[in-house]
Image (tube, helix red, strand yellow):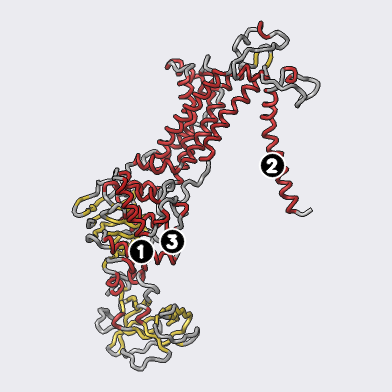
Amino acid sequence: MPSSFFKPTLRYLVSLIVVAVFVFPIAWFGLTSIKPISAVFNKDRVVVFDFKPTLENYHVTVLGGEKASMVGGQSASMGTSGKGAYDGRGSILSSVIIAVASTFLATAIALLAAYALSRMRFWGAQGYLNWVLSQRFLPPIAIIIPLVFIFHDLGLRDTHFGIIIAHTLINIPIALLLLKSFFDDVPVEIDQAAMIDGATRFQCFYMVVLPMIRGGIAATAVLCFIFSWTEFILSLFLTNTIRTIPVKITTFVTSTGSEWGYISALGTAAIIPGFIFILLVQNHLVRGLTMGAIKD
Amino acid sequence: MASVKISKLEKQYGLLKVLHSLDLEIADGKFVVLLGPSGCGKSTLLRMIAGLEKITSGDVFFDDVRVNDVHSKDRNIAMVFQNYALYAHMTVRKNMAFSMRLKNIDKKIQDEKVAWASSILGLDDYLDRLPKELSGGQRQRVAMGRAIVRDPDVFLFDEPLSNLDAKLRVQMRTEIKDLHQRLKTTTVYVTHDQIEAMTMADEVVIMQDGRIIQSGSPMEIYDNPNSLFVAQFIGSPGMNIIECDVAEKAGVKSANHESLCLPLPSDAKVEVGQKIFYGIRPEHLTANKEPSAESNSSLTIEPGVVRVVEPTGPETHVYSKLAGQDVCSISRERITWSPGEAIHLQPDLQHVHLFDGQTQVAL
C-alpha cells in the first residue's frame, strides 16, 4: 500500500480515537440526561439507545417543572428532595451573573495592571509580578477557613458580590500574566509613535494598544469565564442559598440516592452558556492582529 | 519649523555614561544626519530630542525654548521609526489622520491633509487598506505620511530605511530628500549607513562612543576627516590606511612600512621617527602597468600584485597587495587587469591624509 494513502489514514484514525476518548464522557453524560430512570439504572446490560428518550430531566432541572415520577414512590417522604429541590433555574442565573461579572472585572483590572507592567519601568516591578504569580500557587482550600470568616464579618457571605470578588481575585493573576505577554508582543515604538502624535498615555492605551490585542483579551476572558463557571470550592463554602451550578449539582446526590438523570441534565445544560460565549469571541481568538504594524 | 540646539547634553544609565556632554546646533530647515556605528549613542540622542528618553543633564532647546520638561506630545515633532510602528488596526487613512483626530481638527481639514500627503507619497490607492496589506516600502511611506500631515517643527528619522531592500532604499532616499526640499522642515536623521549620510545631509554629525567626533557638510568631512575613525568610516570603498614610521633619506622625508617607502607631502608636519597612519583614498591612487616616468616625487613605490578586480561600470575597483597591505584603487579608465599582475600605484600627494600613530588625530 502506498505510504501516501497509509499515512494520512493512520493519522486520521489516531485523531479519531483521541477525539472519541474526549467526547465519550460528554456524550454519555448527554445520553444519560435523556434517559428515563429505568434506563439509567439498568443493571443487566448497558443501554445505549434502546429506550424511549425523555426530556423530563430537563423539564425539572432547567425549567423548574414538577417532578412527575418518583423512584419507587419513596422520594417525597425522605427529607431533602422537597418541592423545587431540583429546580436549577436560580443556579443558572447565579452562575451567569457571577461568571460574567467576575470575568469582566478580572479582565478590566488585569488589563490596566498588565499595561503598566509591560510598558513602565518602576521599582519592584519584577518582584510584584512574581508575587502576583505566587498567589496562584496556593490552593483555594488552604485559605478557605479564614476567607469564610472574613466574608462573614464583611457581610459578603452568601452574596453574589462576594463570590464575584473571590473569583475575580483568583482570576487576576493568570489574566495579568497572559495580558502582559500580549502587551509585550506589541512593540513599544507603537506607544511612542502615538505619544509623538499627541496622545496621552491613556489615549495611547485605549485607542492604539488595546485594539491591537483584541485577540489576547478575548482569550483571557474565555479562560476567566471557564474558571468561574466551573469553580466549586469557593462557591460551596461562601454561599448557603446562592448556589452556582457546580454546587447545585452536588445537592442532587441525596441520602436516598443519586439523581443521575437530573445531574446529567443540568450538567449538559451548563455546557451551553460557555459554548455560546466561546462562539461569540472565537473570531477574535486569532493571533496576528499586530501584523503589519512593524517589519517582522 | 524650528531650530534645535543641544547644550552639554548627557545621558547615563546607572553607572554607564552613554552620551558625554554633547553640543550641537541645527539651524532651521537643515537636514542633519547623525552618523555612527551601532551603540555610539545616535539613537539615544534622537530619542532625547523627541522626549522619549529622560535627560540626565544638559538642555535641549527648540527655537531657544528649553524643552527638557515638555512631553513628547507637546513638542510638535514627528518621528519615523525603523520598524514603522504603524497602528495595525487602523487603515492607512486613519493612521495618517490619527494625530489630527486627537486634536479634534475638523474632519474636512483632516481629509484634505491626508489627501495632500497621500498624493505626495503615492498612496492614493491604498488609503483604505490595513498596514498588513501593504509592502515594506508602502508601509514606510505611510509612516512618513503620518509624520508630514502634522506639519511638525522638527522631523526625526530613526534609521527609517534599514529594513528595506537595497533598491527600495535608494528610491526612498531620493524621496525623503525630495520631501525635505519641498517642505523645508528641520530634520534630524539617524543612520549607520554612510552613503545615506553623504547623499542626503546638509550637515553630517559623526558620533563615536557617545561623543561627537566631527560635524560638517558631507564633502568637508570627506575631504578633511579630523581623525582616523572618520577617515575610515566615510567613503566606500574605504580609505587605504597604512601604518608607517617617518624616516628621512637625503633630506627627503618619507613614510616607511617594511620595504614600502611612501612619499609625503612637502608641508607634512611630521618628525623623523614618528609613528603615523598614512591614508589615501582609492580614487587618489593612480594605477599603472609600468612605473610612471613623470613621477612627481623622488620616490618610486615598489609594485604591488593585483588580487581582485571589480568593474562597476563607470569605474573599476582594483584590490591589490602592496608590501603585505591590502590596497584599493579606483580608476575610471578601462584598463584590463588580471589577478597576479604587477600594479604600479602612485598617490596624489595633495590628497594624502596623515594621522598621528598614538592619538589617531589628523596631522
Helix, strand or loop for disc 1? helix
Residue annotated with mark 1: B175
Subunit bearing disc 3:
B
> Left or right of A162: which side holds A85?
right
The single residue placed furthest to the bottom in the displayed view is B293
Q: Quadrant of residue B229?
A: bottom left
Residue annotated with mark 3: B164
Numbered badge on residue A15: 2
Which of B312 and B141 lies nearest the eye of the viewer?
B141
Q: Which marked residue is nearer to the observer: mark 1 or mark 2? A: 1
> For mark 2, does the 10 Å Cα neighbourhood hold few (<14), some (14 to 19), or many (20 or more) residues?
few
Q: Residue type at mark 3: give it.
A: Leu
Q: Which marked residue is nearer to the observer: mark 3 or mark 1? A: 1
Q: Residue type at mark 2: give it.
A: Ser
In percent of width and height, residue B320 lies at: 45, 81
Subunit bearing disc 2:
A
Q: Residue type at mark 1: give it.
A: Glu
Q: Are marks 3 and 2 on the same chain?
A: no
